[in-house]
Structure formats: structure tokens, C-alpha cells
Amino acid sequence: MYDLVVIGTGMGGGTLLAGLCDSGLRILAIERGDFLPREEQNWQVDAVFGARRYRTRETWLDGQGRWFVPNLHPWVGGNTKVYGAALVRLRREDFAPVEHAEGISPGWPITYEELEPYYCLAERLYLVHGSSGEDPTEPLRSCPYPYPPVPHEPVVAELAAQLRQAGLHPSALPLGIDLRPNGRCLRCSTCDGFPCRVHAKADAEVRAVRPALQFPTVELRPRTVARRLLTDATGRRIRAVEVESGGEVFEILAEQFVVAAGAVHSAALLLRSANDTHSHGLANRSGAVGRFLMAHHNTLLMAIDRRRENATTFQKTLAVFDFYWRTPAFPYPAGSLQLIGKRSPETVALSFPALTMDEARDIAAHSVDWWLLSEDLPHPENRVTVRSDGHIQVTWHPTNGTAHTALLRAAREVLEACGYREFLVQSIGLDGVAHYCGTVRFGNDPATSALDPSCRAWEIENLWVVNASVFPSSGAVNPALTIAALALRAADHLRRQFGIATPVRETVQRLTGAQLQP
């Protein structure tokens, strides 16, 4: 019998473990995957992107009944094992209703000011390198960045200067990598999208799960799949989680349960757990579980100038948020631009198979590579369902495409002004989505949300959900830092639930060995 079972060890579940590791609670983390091996293939393009060595073998159905392999990585640490470590805060205004060209992005049940102290803690835990004062949309901060920004290499520094001359406000992209004095980071070309062989990426395994496992009351059970949550006779409490491991099916009992299995798997688990008392799934009296799926609009934009070679190794250091709320020609929110890891000839060829290898080499040598990200508005028919045969189906029709079109147009215009005349554009489809959000939303009204503002289920007193599935809206930045902040906030709520007086702030201070400002 455990005090707490946490299902999933990605940015939500892993960070929650770190936030509770010294509480004395008997905690078990369940993870369907294993520890990702440190091996030569970690940094090989053919293995990572060609053979998809670390990607799930699971298949889902889309809304038209077609099979696809989702962009998930089932390891301890979840998708953070291969993420680009861009750790950006939502803007303050994102927490309130926002008018978009195609509808309203709903507000959150908490304010930015309520989450802001936990953003500070998450940035400390995940070694965020950044700087304030450059980005005009940046929300107010009560703490400085823990570490200085990652320096631009010459081509990126020149591009930043050109963007400023064009009237924009390029800023350092906040990154979670270990560039501390004597840190592990090599600033290599195999960071964004690759596992880090030297554990220099601030992922959930390295920065949260492994430190938590140093405490004797924290356990991890890898290679274990949560099948169903089982309620007691009243239906008001979860009594056990039914799991499958090593070919055996058994139950694990606990006082409190946290679901942190990602937006799709978390919703699917609650739906699969339907019983006589909860006929439509757990925490689903509102009908919100599985609905309001958001996935962001994502586009790879390669800007090419044949006159300039780009020999940059670590390119992902620059962002532009000037178009977050509007563009010169579009009076609604458009989105954000971020440099990504430098594209190699091999990755260019994989993205654009019509190119010859010689063409891919020439393009890679002369391009700067951007990721464009726009908000996808929640819609009730964008949803996760579990079919009668047990398979997951994801129905998603992108919303707010007008905004992404405006963002792409504005990006091309400003890059053309900087001398880039050729462009390659790749839109990211459902099988490439890494930012699923919104399927178990929290809110102030149990009639329209599954969870209360603390991330606990309205109708089940010992069930919590902590990951991007709780997002009522997705903003236009990477969700990882917000997930971590919400997890640390939930850790404080759970401490109070168990009568533990010490706050999560002291735990983060202990784990990082740093004095945190009040």
C-alpha cells in the first residue's frame, strides 16, 4: 500500500516526483517504458530519424480510421528524452480569454501570477538559460533566469542584428541544458530531437526522476502499463490501479493517484476505467474527458541564402515573439518563431525526399532553420476516444489556420528583408505532433471541466491529473515549462493533502543546491 502512485514519468509525472521526493511519502512511479540506453545510436541521424529507433511502436487511428504511429517516446522521462529543451513561459495574457481570428481561446482557472513562483522553481530545476528584457511579450518575472543565455554563434548573431534592424525584437531562446561551469553540455549538433548521450539535456529523467529515486521512499516500476483505475464501492475514491508487467496483471493500492501519462494516454486511461458508477469514464461527468484536444500548428521553415554559408553547430538559441499577438497585416494573435537544431543534409533529405542528396547538402550549408508555432483552439469534437477493440482513436481537425498562415507570411517577409530568398516549408501532420494538450481540462466549473483548479478530479477525491491534458488553451509556446510549473504547484497541494508543512520550494532548493530568492 503506497501513499501515492504516479502514472507516467514525463515532464508532469517526473517533476511531481521531484517535488515530493523528500516528503517521506511512500511513492511509486509507474512507467510503460524503460531507461533509454546511452549508446552510439543516440547521436546518429539514420537511427533517430530514419529508423525511429526511440519512437513508440504503438499505432493509433486518426479520425478517418487510418493507422499512424504517433510521435511519442515511451521511456523514463517520456518525450523530454528527445525534446529540444525550449522552456518558455506562457504569456500573462494567455491565462485569460483571448480573441483569435477564428474564435476565443478560453481562460484558465488560475492566473499567471498564481503560477509564476512555480515557473521560477521549474526554471531552477531544469537549468534554464535565458535573459530578460529583449522580448516585448515576456511576462513579468519575480526571479532572474538561473543561468545566462546560450551564446549565439556568428551566423545567428548576425541574423539577430538584421532582425533588429528590420524592427523586430529577437531574444535568446530559454533552454534547459547543462552549460553551468564544468557542466556536461558539448553544444553539439545532436541535441534537438536526439537523446542526449552525455545527459546534458535537462530532461525529466535526468533532472527529476533520477534525483527523486535517491530517496528511500520513492520507487520506480518501469515496463509497467496502467490498464485501468479501479474505484471503491462508492465511486468517490480510487482504490487501485490495475497494471500489466512482465505478462502478469495485478493491482497496486494507494491513498492518492496521479495520472501523468500524456494528454492522449491520460484521457484514454480515464475512459477505459468506466464502471457502473462512472459509465462514461472517470472524472467525466462533464463529458470533457477526451475532448478539446489541441496540437498546435507546427511548420518547419528553412530560409536559404546561397551567398552565405551557415556553419553553425548549435543553432537553437534565438526566438522571435513579435508576432505573438499580431502581425503588421493581421490584427489577431499569430504565433512564435524559434530556431531549431541545425538541419543536416540527412535530415533535409528525410524531410524533403524529392531532393537529391547533393541538393540536400547545398541547402543545409546555406539555410537557417525555423520552427513556426501557432495556437490551435480547443474544439469539443477534436478528441480522444477508445474503441471497443481497445485501440485509441485521435480525431483532430486543426483550428485557427488563418493565424498560422499569417505567421508564415510575416516570417517569410522579414527573412526576405534579411536577404533570404528561397524557402522550404514542411507542415507537421498528426504523426509529428509533440504538443498534445487539453483532453482532461481543469476549470472553475464542474459542469464544463474534469478537474478543479488544483488539478484534482471534481468527482473523485483522490484522483489528480498533472500534464498538458489539463490545459484549457495551448498558447503559442512549447508546453514543457508550464507542465513542470503545474506539477510543482500540484506537489504543494498534495503536501497539504497529506499534512506536510514544508513547501515544494524547499525541496527544489535542496535538489539544486541553490538559494532561491523569496
Image (tube, rainbow, N blue to C red):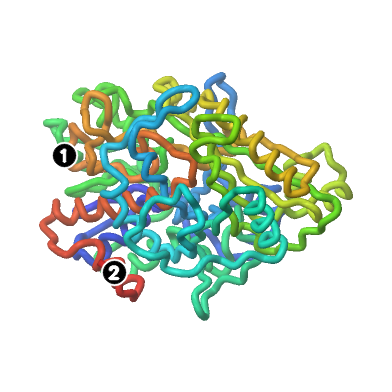
Residue in the image at 32% along x and 46% along y = 112
Occupied quadrant, residue 70: top right
Q: Is residue 4 visible?
A: yes
- Badge 2 local density, few (<14 within 10 Å), some, or many (20+)? few
Q: Quadrant of residue 42?
A: bottom right
Quadrant for the C terminus in the image: bottom left
- Name the amino acid, label 2: Gln
Q: Is residue 209 visible?
A: no
Which residue carries the number 1 mark? 461
Amino acid carrying label 1: it is Glu
**What x and y, as percent, mark residue 106?**
35, 30
Label 2: which secondary element: loop
Measured from the top left, where is residue 15 in percent x and y?
35, 57
The image shows residue 67, relative to residue 245, as above or below, that is above
The tag on residue 517 is 2
User: Contact, CB < 8 Å: mark 2 with mark 1?
Assistant: no
